[in-house]
Amino acid sequence: MFEFWLAISLPLRLATLAIIGLLGGAVANYVIYTWCWLPRPISPWAPPSADAPARRKLDYVPLLGWFSLRREVKLHGRGFWIRPLLIELGLAIAIPALYLFETQNGGMLAESLQVPEVLQLPWLITWGHRIFLGHAVLLMLMVAATFIDFDEQTIPDIITVPGTLFALLLGAISYWGFMPISLPIGDAPTSLHQATFGVPWFPEPRGPGASDFEKWWTSTGLLCGLAIWSGWCFALADRRLILRKGYAKAIEFFCAGLVRHATWKWLLGIWIAGLIAISIVFQLGGIHWHGLLSSLIGLAVGGGVVWAIRIVASNAMGVEAMGFGDVTLMAMIGAFLGWQAAVAAFFLAPFAAIVIVIIQFMVTREPRIPFGPYLCAGAALTVIGWDRVMNQWFLPNLYFLGSFIFWLSFGMLALMGGMLFVWRHIKQRIFA
């Protein structure tokens, strides 16, 4: 199948990907308007409003159909069709552009490696296509999550949960789906290494046979993977800790809440199936366990960073600081891209937010600021500027700080909590 794809001429491949992008945009629009908290009968693939005229065949054609659907302006508001049209057009352009960037131009490699004799290496061609597949799916998922978050300030689990499971499946197939890191760090690149769960600080890549990696192919690695999976499943459960009536009642209410909704049976089934699947992949070992563990650790770091900030900020401010959808979204991004990219995306998100907030306010006059779109933009910037972000900034600083960065992160988290706590009391005094 892969050889057949490469045998097709590049223009035909790009045209095919443009069509896939159009269809992906149509699916994203369906998800945006029907999988949200308050569905709206806008997508032609969803049941129409009772007052809407009968659907025409042209309505179902991506991109062109929105010109036909303008007749429903009285039902959905002026210009309602413009955004979904632009989403489909944008993905029809973005998917082929991403393909060119990652598979043909070597855009994620260092500039000195973006030469024909490197780009034409068979293993690098395979690597680039695997990376592109994961990123194309992630892009479509992030588009749907972004616009639902803009509309409702929430991100449904029905997007992030299947997305995370797909990312873990890709990781279990092979660790070659993770992005390239140029080695040695901070010097002229001479080789490439996958951005898996390891920290490639050393001049030579290290693999399963290296002494500092051996423990991840033992029960230590298995327990770590099972713990991350269990933590993710627990995070998806309905968790409420109410301490007003004491710890005994709090535990009672907490346990009752876990099984309050019928979805707990599905979640329990997913958890058990995941434990079995992770154990099987661990027994297979090799590239399969290497890739799956890399996805799991990316999930843990991506979701864990946002969850920690949410807990600290919410307690310091006395109100919910971030939605839990942001946690599951960043966990999904980490599972696709790995922990290094998840951290970089989180730090780039505020810079993307500056631009998005200004545009959003100018267009909609909406003052509320959902955080999910900025996380998605940060992930996109990380992929597009991978060499500058990772090879020239993140890893050299990580190499310089070493293990101190762990304690620095805790210190910054505590400092943020303290500043928010002080600001909370200042506001209470001012607006009392």
Image (cartoon, rainbow, N blue to C red):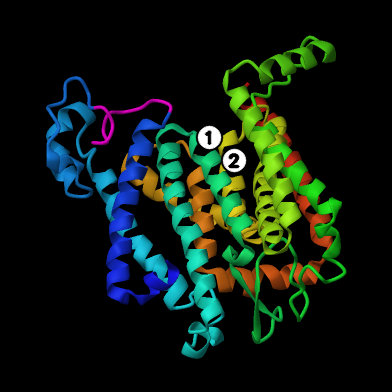
Q: Give the label on residue 328, or none.
A: 2
Q: Which residues are magenta?
A: 37-47
Circle 2/circle 1 CB separation < 8 Å: yes
**What residue is at 32 percent from the left and 56 percent from the top?**
20
On the image, the x and y values in percent for residue 213 come to 82, 65
Query: Would you say 205 lies left or right of 100 here?
Result: right
Query: Where 413 sits versus 190, above or below?
Result: above
Query: Would you say 123 lies left or right of 185 here?
Result: left
Q: Quadrant of the N terminus?
A: bottom left
Residue type highlighted by circle 2? Thr
| Number of callouts | 2
Q: Nearer the viewer, residue 42 or 186?
A: 42
Q: Nearer the viewer, residue 1 or 121?
A: 1
**Residue 419 visible in the displayed image:** no
Q: Secondary structure at mark 2?
A: helix
Q: Quadrant of the C terminus?
A: top right
On the image, the x and y values in percent for residue 368 come to 46, 36
Q: Nearer the viewer, residue 14 or 238?
A: 14
Residue type highlighted by circle 1? Asp
Query: Would you say 307 lies left or right of 353 here?
Result: right
**What residue is at 57 percent from the left and 58 percent from the top?**
348
Query: How far is disc 2 from disc 1 in space, using C-alphas?
Result: 7 Å
Query: Would you say 429 lies left or right of 118 here?
Result: right
Graded by Cα atoms within 10 Å as few (under 14), some (14 to 19) or many (20 or more), the crowding at tag 1 reads some
Q: What residue did someone put label 1 on?
A: 157
| Image quadrant where residue 212 sits | bottom right
